[in-house]
Image (tube, rainbow, N blue to C red):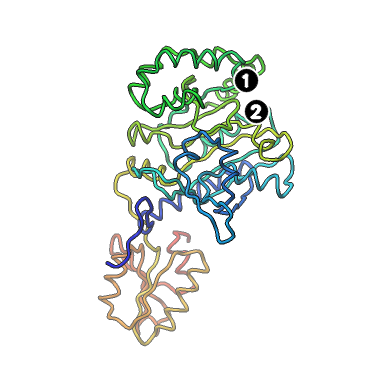
Amino acid sequence: MKYQRLRGVKDVFSPDNSVWESIIAAAVSVFKTYNYSLIITPTIEEISLFSRGIGEASDIVMKEMYDFNDKKGRHIVLRPEGTASVVRAYIENSLPEKSDMYYIGQMFRYERPQTGRYREFYQIGVESFGDATPYKDAEVIILASAILKAAGIKDAVLNINCLAADAGYYEKLKNFLEEKKSGLCGDCKNKLSRAPIRVLDCKNEGCRQAVAGAPLITEHLTPGAGASFSKIKSLLTAAGISFTVNPAMVRGLDYYTAVVFEFTTDKLGPQQNTILAGGRYDNLVEELGGKKTPATGFAMGIERLFEVLKAQEGTITEAGPEAFIIVDKEFIDRGFELVNSLRNSGIRCAMGYQERSFKSQFREAESKKAGFAVIIGETEVNTGKYSVKNMADGSQKEIEAAGIAAYIKGRP
């Protein structure tokens, strides 16, 4: 073959596309219920938006961004995540101070491809601005839980933490980690000076053992943050949302300031266990040139959710058309008229337009897993009633064209 897709990207087609569609549809339905509106931002941005917004010391900025100079010499990046772009749009377009938005789009990171992790990947995310109350944090977490449930994810585990520590915590943590430095991996040793809290979230087993006795951030929260975190926990409990407080969970982005959360699964292994994550970031709008504005949100990868659903359900099959029109070559115009009529009635319908035998058309109907075959031959045209065959049990009934849609849908 002359051309092949690049490493770390994928083509999505039948039957996998049906799962993607169901994930997106489930998310959009929940967003509408919560009155969140769609925002669409560009795929390309200035690199400084992310180096400043995400953090120059983050792995994404240091290792994973696709960046290049355009024809005018501007340093451009393919967006590696959605939050910074939405914040930029929020500021630049002077959107209402209180704005609840969601996005669906492509992100790009140059990292080692794994199951559910690609260099081009699709995220569904939420960004909510202008509300600093714990009620908004709880709402966003409950919304996230509702999306996972609507998408069909089972047994997801919610972990929460709060990063709003008092002034002495980070120095205490750094001193502790310096004493454990010999047991840390190379990446964590590099993080000691620039972002010591990230060492707590390392997946390396040696690092996990080394930091096991680290001071807990939840025991060093500021009074205001402690009260807010307690309220969030009580709101989640009241809403029937189970959770675990995980003081070692910090997330990999610099902009988080208070509560952070992630939903995990055991379906894909320890390196791919996070399926949705987010938190509060009250300083980012100001840091990117806007006025001080509280904000919170989350993101989830469609590819990761797809892999979890596949692990749960096994083989994926796409639903076929509800009806397939099988027509004698002399009556193709009748068939074309009927297929459009059924579609206008909301019936998923298909038809082949080439001149073929009934046997060949029935094979196509079977291959497409059609629910019913509607047969149009000379007898049907003469009587004004079309033969409608149930492809599952073989039963057949003659029905006038005007009644076929109701019959297929099971209505009298």
The extreme front residue here reads 73
Mark 2 residue crowding within 10 angstroms, few (<14) / some (14–19) / many (20+) = some
Q: Residue at x 59, y 49 (%)?
A: 46
How many labels were placed on the picture? 2
Residue 209's label in the rendered image is none
- State the residue position of label 1: 231
Q: Secondary structure at mark 1?
A: helix
* Residue nearest the observer in this picture, 338 or 198: 198
Classify residue 37 as left or right of residue 359: right
Q: Secondary structure at mark 2?
A: helix
The foreground one among 355 and 306 is 306
**Mark with earlier residue (1, 2):** 2
CA gap between label 1 and label 2 equals 8 Å
Left or right side of 119 for 261: right
Image x and y of residue 169, in percent: 56, 14
User: Above or below — where is 239 with respect to 125?
Assistant: above
Residue 355 at what x, y percent from top left? Answer: 32, 83
Image quadrant assignment for residue 283: top right
Nearer-the-camera pick, 11 or 22: 11
Q: For this view, does 179 lie left or right of residue 223?
A: left
Report the residue at 64% width, 35% height from top: 284
Q: Quadrant of the N terminus?
A: bottom left
Residue 399 to residue 379: above or below: above
Instruction: Using a 10 Å C-alpha cutoff, classify the residue at mark 1 as few (fewer than 14 neighbours), some (14 to 19) or many (20 or more).
Output: some
Reading the image, the residue beneath label 2 is 135
Above-or-below relation of 59 to 177 = below
Residue beneath the point at 66% across and 48% down: 89
Camera-side residue of 277 and 189: 189
Residue 222 image offset from top left, x and y in percent: 63, 15
Three-letter code for the amino acid on which mark 2 is drawn: Tyr
Identify residue type, mark 1. Lys
